[in-house]
């Protein structure tokens, strides 16, 4: 079955960067799309962007351009998201999800990122 | 960005029918999808492209609508349906989500 296993919680200092991972199994990663999302607990969900594992092509929500960078490693069927120049406003749970280019049937369990000095 | 407006909260009794609405600030064709999220969990896809039931989702859930007005219906409601329900559109860039409707089962 399809599984998306995300990396563990992160506590990072303001101004730092963090790299989150999403290891997949149970489907053909190399021809799939992966999206990433941000959710502040108790609030709605924001779409950050999407990457096509076949060629690394990306599409970003304009709001997150310069903040998030999406990459993949097809040899390990893992997707990554780099978040840079972190501020307290970046504190949130981040999800990876796959399915189609429009809707998302499979989600990771989420990674909590806390930005604090 | 396309704003999706949902009512904040609803409370119903088990066995009743509940409709959760989502209104888009601009047309999204039929590219509206619905998710259920329970506290501390990831979202779960319920309905895709307005009216298609996702795999493994009980037939108690259904969706309707097109253009700017969409509805998720649960009939009959069960205690386990306590959750927050989000709509999401993928017709306009960027993809956006509604603010969520918190469903309480009395």
Image (cartoon, grey):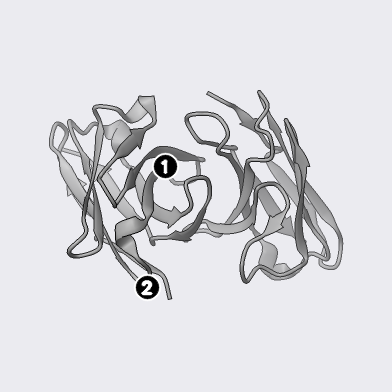
In terms of sequence position, does the residue under pointer 1 or pointer 2 come before the other? 2
Q: Quick check: A67 left or right of A41?
A: left
Q: Residues within 10 Å of mark 2 (few under 14, many from 20)?
A: few
Q: Do we see residue B40 in this rendering?
A: no
Q: Give left or right: position of A94 versus A14.
A: right
Crowding at mark 1 (Cα within 10 Å: few <14, some 14-19, many 20+): some
Q: In which quadrant of the rendered view does residue B21 lie?
A: top right
Q: Could you tell me which residue is drawn at 70 percent across and 47 percent down? A: B50
Q: For the C terminus of chain A, which image quadrant? A: top left
- Determine whether A110 is above or below B4 in the image: below
Front: mark 1 or 2: 2
Q: Nearer the viewer, residue B23 or A25?
A: A25
Q: Nearer the viewer, residue B45 or A85?
A: B45
In what element is the residue under mark 1?
Answer: loop
Q: Specify whether A2 is left or right of A64.
A: right
Residue B39 percent location from the top left of the image: 51, 58
- x then y, percent, for residue B89: 59, 38
**To which chain does the residue with label 2 belong?**
A
- Under tag 2, what secondary structure? loop
**Which quarter of the figure has residue B88?**
top right
Q: Is residue A42 visible?
A: yes
Residue A103: x %, y % from top left: 53, 49
- Would residue B98 appear left or right of A31 to someone viewing this image? right
Mark number displayed over residue A26: 2
Quadrant into which the N terminus of chain A falls:
bottom left
Residue at mark 1 to residue at mark 2: CA–CA distance: 29 Å
Q: Nearer the viewer, residue B44 or B95?
A: B95
Q: Which mark is residue A40?
A: 1
On residue B1, which mark appears?
Answer: none
Residue positioned 73% across, 52% down in the render: B51
């Amino acid at each position: 079955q399809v599984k998306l296993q995300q990396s563990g919680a992160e506590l990072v200092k303001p101004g730092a960067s963090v790299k989150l991972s999403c290891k997949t199994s149970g489907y053909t990663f190399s021809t799939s799309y992966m999206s990433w999302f941000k959710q502040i607990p108790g609030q709605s969900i924001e779409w950050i962007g999407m990457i096509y594992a076949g060629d690394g092509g990306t599409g970003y929500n304009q709001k997150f351009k310069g903040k998030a960078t999406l990459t993949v490693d097809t040899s390990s069927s893992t997707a990554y998201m780099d978040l840079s120049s972190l501020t307290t406003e970046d504190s949130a749970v981040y999800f990876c999800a796959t399915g189609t280019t429009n809707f998302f049937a499979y989600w990771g369990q989420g990674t909590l990122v806390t930005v604090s000095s | 960005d396309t704003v999706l407006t949902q009512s904040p909260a609803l409370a119903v009794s088990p066995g009743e029918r509940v409709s959760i609405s989502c209104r888009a600030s601009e047309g999204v064709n039929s590219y509206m999808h619905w998710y259920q999220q329970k506290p501390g969990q990831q979202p779960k896809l319920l309905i895709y492209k307005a009216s298609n039931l996702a795999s493994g989702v009980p037939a108690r859930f259904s969706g309707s609508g097109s253009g700017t007005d969409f509805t998720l219906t649960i009939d009959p409601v069960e205690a386990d349906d306590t959750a927050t329900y989000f709509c999401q559109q993928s017709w306009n860039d960027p993809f956006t989500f509604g603010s969520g409707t918190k469903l309480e089962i009395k």
